[in-house]
Structures are given as structure tokens and as C-alpha cells.
Image (cartoon, rainbow, N blue to C red):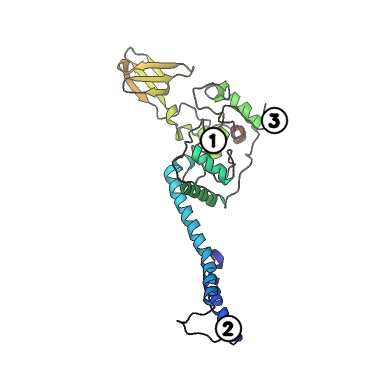
Amino acid sequence: MHGGNSRHLVPDVQHALFQPLVAQMALGIPIAPPDTPTIMEPILSVKFFFLLLPLTLYAQTDAGISHGRALFRTNCAFCHGLTAEGGRGPNLVSAPLHHGESDEDLRNTIRQGVPGTTMPSFENFSDDEVRSLVDYLRSVSRATVKRTTVLGDPQTGRQIYTKSGCPACHRIGREGSVFGPDLSRIGASRPLEYLRESVVHPSADIPPEFEGVTAVLKNGKRVHGVRVNEDTFTLQLRDPSQRVISLMKDEVQQLTYDKQSLMPAYDRLSPADLQNLLAYLASITGTAHGAVKEAEGIR
């Protein structure tokens, strides 16, 4: 009754109203005055019920999607983007969902979160709220095409990753450094667009836990690294050698928080090298328990 067929609503109602009356006349049954009950009233009531039921269900579904959109923008858009196409969190509408594609899988992920990642649990959401969120995600994904492959050669991309010195800062599984973000699940936790931006323009979005800090001590010594922890009296940094350095703030003469990422911009890679590197990163889907899964054929 909605969309392209809405123009037929009035004729359908007219048909439902007058067809029983025509049948009465054909059988020679007198048509009673308006205030007089007839045997046709239950039939008309049933007809009206089935006429209005699709409209009612449509209104309820539309309201659920609107509610889900509001919940998503309040609780989820910061990581997954305003239209659920990804950001710090994965793309939820056009990329494969690594924790399951069914409605039940989505509901479980919302309620339980993803251990080992920044995806929290929303266990306080009611069943209706979780259902509305899933309805909204389904509504925005219907018009999109699921991306199943990423252009480029992951095996060549791995070679570029190693040659560019990435393991000196990043860890994949048990290999590499913890100075920068762990990439063991990067293909499952970040959309392709975010990966591209992070490689070419890393300062565009710096995770707070990897902000660079430079401390100049009163004795003139400079200490530079990633801020691990900070309170009123102390500061802990991790330097590129993965050593954690603890400083008392009364020893610090000047403290500077970097506005640029500690990761260099790889904006001079050729288009082919960049695409191969992205294909490799997208292939690393891992698990929340530390195991690393790469695309088949990568050695």
C-alpha cells in the first residue's frame, strides 16, 4: 500500500466497501438503513482490518528505523561514521561483517561488544532498542553492494609493509613492535577508506592512546615517546625501543603534546604499491584472542 502503489489505495477501499452491497442487491436482499445492523458488518470489519494492517506495520517499522537512526548517531557514529560506512570502527553497510551477518549476530555484537577491541558492550539497551539499531543498519545497507575483495596483491603488499619499516612500530600477532597500534585485526576493525587515510595522512586522526609527547627535563634531557599514562604528579612514556619511562612532573621543565602523528606519511608510494599495501592490511582479520589470519597465499 505504500511506495509506488499508494495511488491505488482509494480504489481498493471503494471496492471493499461497495462489493458486498452489490452482492446483496443481486441476491434480492434489502439494503438496511445506515443505523440498522446487517449480516455484512462483520465482513466489512474484517476487510477494514486487513486493509489497515499493512499500513500499521509499515508505520511501526518506519518508526523503529527512525529510533534506530537516533540511537546509532548518539552511540555509534563517532567510530562507525554518521552513515555507518566506517571510521575508527569498521564499515557496517558495504563491507563484510567479520562477527556474523545475521540479525542475531548483530544483536549479540551490540549487546556483548568485541573483546580485545574498542567496541564496548551495550548490555543496558532494551530488546526494542537493539532491534531498532539492527533495523536501521539493514535499511542503510539494502541499497549498497557488499565489498568482498580489495584490489591489489596482498603478498606484494606484505613485502612493501616490511620494506617500509612498518614492523619497527607495529605488531601483527607476535611479530613486530608495540610502539604503534597493533595491526593483528586491522582488516576486520577498520574500513578500507580509513586505512588509506592512515597510511597517506596519519595525522588526520590520531588515537589518544598513541599521541606523541615530548618532555624536557630540568637537567636539559629530552624524552620523546607515546603517552602511556598520566596523572597529576607522574607521566609514563613508551619510547621507540619499547621501553617505558616514568617521570615525576616536578622534574619536567616543559611538556609538549604533539599535534602531528609519530607515524610518517607514506604519501610518496606509487598508486600500485599503495593499493598492494592496502590489500595486505585488509587481509589481516585476526581474532579477538590474538590469532592472526591473513589472506591465503601470503608468505
Kindly check if marks 2 and 3 are in contact, taking CB atoms under 8 A apart as contact. Answer: no
What's the amino acid at mark 1?
Ser
Eyeballing the image, is 101 above or below 153?
below
Apparent side of residue 285 relative to residue 113 in the rendered image (left or right): right
Q: Which residue has dot 3 on it?
A: 297
Q: Residues within 10 Å of mark 3 (few under 14, many from 20)?
A: few
Q: Earlier in the sequence, mark 1 or mark 2?
A: 2
Q: Position of residue 137 (x, y in %)?
A: 52, 48
Q: Is residue 91 visible?
A: no
Mark 3 vs mark 1: in front: 1
Q: Which residue has dot 2 on it?
A: 24
Instruction: Give the quarter of the figure containing the C terminus.
Output: top right
Q: Position of residue 127 (x, y in %)?
A: 48, 47
Q: Which residue has dot 1 on it?
A: 189
Local secondary structure at mark 3: loop
Residue sitting at the far top:
219
